[in-house]
Amino acid sequence: MNCDSLIADSVSIGLVLVDGTGRVCLWNGWIELRAARPSAQVLGLTLGEAFGARIDPRIVLVVREALDFGWSSRLSHALHPMPLPLFQPGSEHGERMLQAVDVTPVDIDGERCCLLQVRDVTETVRREALLRQQARQLREDIQRLSRAQAELQRSEMRFRELARQAPAGLFEADSDACCVFLNERCEQLLGHRLAQVAGTPWPELLPAVEEARIRERWLLAVESATRFAEEFRYSHPDGSPLWMRAEAGPLRDPQGHISGFIGTIQDVTEFHERASRNEFRANHDGLTSLLNRDRFERHLRAAISGAREVTDRLALLFIDLDGFKSINDTHGHLAGDTVLKVVASRVRRVVRSEDRVARYGGDEFAVLLYEAGDEKTLSAIVAKITHAVALPINLGHCHVRVGCSIGSAVYPDDSQDPLGLLTSADRRMYAAKRGQPF
Amino acid sequence: MRAFSELEMDALTEAFNLSLGEAAATFSAIVREEIDLTVPVVEFVSREELTRRLQSAQDGCADGRMCRINQHFQADEGFSTDALLLFPEQGSLEIVRRMLGDDTSIEHITELEQDALAEIGNIIINSCMNSLAGLIGSEMVGSLPRVQCRSIPRLLDDKAPDNLILVARIGMSMSAHNLSGFVLFLMDVPSIDNFMAQVSRVFGLPEALPEAK
């Protein structure tokens, strides 16, 4: 029995042996420690006496079954959490330790005995509680993820449909300016399918005059990570010349680097045409298409402030038609309009393209010559204009002639300011008209 | 092997039925909840036939795995049998977790749940064995239960193919859960002969019938 006791005390589970009469005949060290009763005190007692009658009645029952019928039984922790009054060594005797008990019949020297094996399942319970907590956490995470995924799918569908129906062209380009997405409208505007242009930096689709400028702006936007907004000319593959406006903002990858741009492309051709028509109308005379008075005087002021720096000589000519009124009276206003248009184009042809010609009002014209030259040169130009104006003008049913009086003023000789020049030229023009030398 | 008469099969069924009633009462006391075990259907089949039936019964079930709780019983006169209780893994998990009051979904059975399932099987098998021991008139000493979860084709591959299997199909229900399981007794050839002789003896004599209960 000593040897048996030694073995029984060496195992790390609780062992209690009950003999055929239901009395304790082995009580190992593991149990001694946890039941706080030495073996010597309990040998020969019933289980109830040994444990102090505070044991689960099912233990008593299965011990009886083992002794009487030879049945083995397991009392799981789940269904019998703490059947025996056992406590963690060193703990206050508050809460019993968590246990699982196996009860088996054993034959010892021809006598049917019953062995109770008690396991401490505290650690297992803790581990499984942790496992459950993790499983719950995982389930919640998965639910959250799948909700987020569903929301993502909905929003992706929403945006895809929006992009499809959007009236503006939408595009996305990578950092090399190659398109990675074009909506239908964008493909229509550009006249290309995405597959056709995917490998090409988009500025290369532009006409040569725009390509370099736009590429430079694009690179600048990529480098500075700023918004790209440019208007440019575009030749649609069907041949129509268009104006486009592209606006795009940078897209960043998870590291914060610019991975591309996303934005819109709009056809602004009509807007451009209307704007340039309006601008022309604001600056030009509707009948002759020459500059109007307002615009001319602005050119004059600009030329004077420019000339001060480079010491250029500028000349201002005032031209007033002679005999215009009688044509108007005789042949009507339409004939008068024809005369004004013809004179305008003749004066325009005499001077150089960079010089400015304006219809100053009624039958008055003004010319700004950027390089006046000397007096002789100026006189030659005046003579040329006089000659050109004086040529016969074809009205369809007859020819008419008009003459002109020209007054000139030179910067900086006559005046150094626009008003002075205008006054001077005006006075000389009237003097010429009266046939008086100034 | 001679076939059992209808009367003998009825008597076996009745014997199991009484035992299962006791098992159900034991459960209800442990979990403090009503647990029903249905009247069993008892028959003898071969291992192959049983595997085939289990497979068709489990068709469409998640992964077709079953848990088996196994106890070995030995009688003095060389008669021995393996008693097995089979439950679908998913269903047994549900019922064990229902008993433990935790429905956290963990794919496979945990150690403590396996222990609880062992106890459930232990109670049912011990009750059924009580009926058989009564029939044979001999004490059967049992081992501790052992739980294993396997796919159906591998469920019985550690048992000899020529074992005759006494199968009692039982149903177990608790709250809204219904679980259908099988209690099996696998016997080797000498045990079959012994068992048959005992059953013949008991059921062959009409006045012996009350003894079997």
Image (tube, helix red, strand yellow):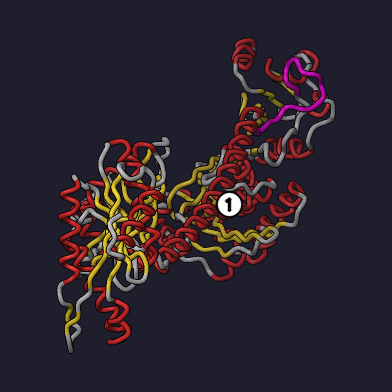
> Residue A77 in the image: x percent, y percent?
67, 36
Residue type, label 1: Ser
Label 1, on which residue?
B92
Q: Is residue A276 above or below residue A95?
A: below
> Residue A200 in the image: x percent, y percent?
21, 51
Residue at the image point whose x is 80% and y is 23% from the top: A50
Taking depth in this image into account, of A134 and A271 the one nearest to the observer is A271
Mark 1 Cα-neighbour bin, 10 Å: few <14, some 14–19, many ≥20: many
Residue at the image point whose x is 56% and y is 59% from the top: B168
Residue A89 falls within the magenta-colored stretch: yes
Residue A225 falls within the magenta-colored stretch: no
- Where, by quadrant of the figure, is residue A403 drawn? bottom left
Taking depth in this image into account, of B202 and A228 the one nearest to the observer is A228
Q: Which residues are magenta?
A: A87-103
Magenta stretch secondary structure, dominant: loop
- Where, by quadrant of the figure, is residue B35 drawn? bottom right
Judged left or right of residue A241, residue B45 is right
